[in-house]
Amino acid sequence: MINQLMELVRDSGQQTVVENPEVPNEKNEAVMEEASSSIHCGLKDMLQTGGPGALKRLFEGVQSGDNDNPAVQQVANQFSGNLTQKLGIGSGTAKSIAGKLIPAVLGKLMNRSKNAESDSSFSIGNILGSLSGGDGQLEGPGQPDGPGQPQGEGGLMGKISNMGTRLGLDKDGDGDTDLKDLLSMFRR
């Protein structure tokens, strides 16, 4: 998942990081790597300490555009602190970068996971697998042959998806358990 996050950060970071005169060019890549790492660690911490409800609050904040949502702020503050401590970026600049980049990347992550049929690496199963200690990639016989194809029982993600389907979590009836299913559980 970290590679997919890095792709989203690079897509979002051109103006916020690369074209930012307060970020030395030699630190651009390190800032983007730190953003990916901070998001991954922040999501992982939320899942471990607050369970799926914490991720739900984060995605609700992202979906509503509420950058002041506590869950969004938690990830942004972690990233901002890391920029200051690890890379020596000034506090004001770090907060500005985090305030723009983190919501943008989380928004793209949510949108990509909603459309997981076209890119299964952003399926909720892969995201949860990565956050729960896996690398977020399918392995072994459970790996699908292509986007939108069902996962077998052999891989970790296949097991998660099958378990979710058996538990009745496939709310849209498409044969897999993904972010669309998770979000539909919390819509009023």
Image (cartoon, rainbow, N blue to C red):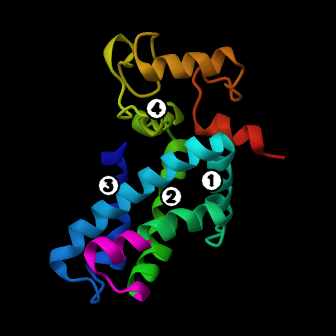
Q: Can residue 147 be seen in this view?
A: yes
- Name the amino acid type tagged 2: Leu
Q: Is residue 144 left or right of residue 18?
A: right
Q: Is residue 18 left or right of residue 174?
A: left
Percent x, y of residue 183: 68, 42
User: Is residue 169 rendered magenta in the image?
Assistant: no
Residue 59: which numbered mark, if any? 1
Looking at marks 2 and 1 on the same chain, the residue that comes earlier in the sequence is marked by 1
Q: Distance between the residues labelled 3 and 4?
A: 17 Å
Residue 78 lies, with reference to residue 169, above or below; the image says: below
Percent x, y of residue 14: 31, 73
At x 70%, y 18%, the residue is 167
Percent x, y of residue 35: 37, 63
Q: Can residue 149 be seen in this view?
A: no
Of circles 4 and 1, which is in front? Answer: 4
- Name the amino acid type tagged 4: Gly
Q: Mark 2 points at which residue?
A: 106
2 and 1 marks in contact (CB < 8 Å) = yes
Looking at marks 3 and 4 on the same chain, the residue that comes earlier in the sequence is marked by 3
- Name the amino acid type tagged 3: Met
Front residue of 42/24: it is: 42
Q: Does dot 3 land on a helix, a strand or a loop?
A: helix
In the image, the segment drawn in magenta is 80-92
Percent x, y of residue 143: 37, 19
Looking at marks 1 and 3 on the same chain, the residue that comes earlier in the sequence is marked by 3
- Name the amino acid type tagged 1: Phe
At x 31%, y 82%, the residue is 89
Where, by quadrant of the figure, is residue 24 drawn?
bottom left
Q: Mark 4 points at which residue?
A: 129
Residue 6: which numbered mark, if any? 3
